[in-house]
Image: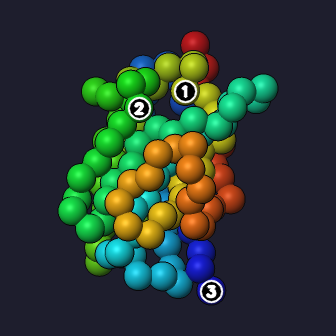
Amino acid sequence: EVQLVESGGGSVQAGGSLRLSCATSGFAFEDYSIAWFRQAPGKEREGVACISNIDRRSDYADSAKGRFTISSDFAMNTVYLQMNSLKPEDTAVYYCAAAWGPCRATNTPYDYWGQGTQVTVSS
């Protein structure tokens, strides 16, 4: 059974940090790319960051560059999203998703999804 389980969300003040985790199981972690998406109330889902477990390349949305870092732990089959200098506009439900092969464009289907974790940033 494929599982992606997010954790690490919570409430933080602006300027603070959080580290999200995406624990995966049930598929060949090393053959997949893992992306983080977020969706705020009333807004469309947007891609935040992606990392390819094949070539270790990562990509970030402009809103995340310089503040967020995505990384993979191959021993734990887990992907992390370190979020620093958080802003109120980062408030959203954050989801991780897996795609076989390299990172896909965020408007294309991903193969597996987690259930999401809430991040709330207060001003």
Can residue 80 be spotted in the picture? no
What's under tag 1, amino acid-wise?
Answer: Asp
The residue shown at (78%, 26%) is: 42
Instruction: Provide residue 115's location: percent of width, then percent of height.
Output: 68, 59
Task: Name the image quarter holding residue 90.
Answer: top right
Task: Name the image quarter holding residue 114.
Answer: bottom right
Res 61 label: 2
Res 90 label: 1
Residue at the spot of label 3: 1
Q: Nearer the viewer, residue 19 or 43?
A: 43
Label 3 or label 1, whichever lies nearer to me, is 3
| Outermost residue, right side | 42
What's under tag 3, amino acid-wise?
Answer: Glu
Q: Is residue 63 above or below residue 70?
A: above
Instruction: Provide residue 98's location: percent of width, then percent of height.
Output: 50, 64
Instruction: Provide residue 15's location: percent of width, then percent of height.
Output: 42, 20
Q: Is residue 19 left or right of residue 74?
A: right
Colour setup of the view: rainbow
Quarter of the figure with the C terminus? top right
The residue shown at (39%, 49%) is: 50
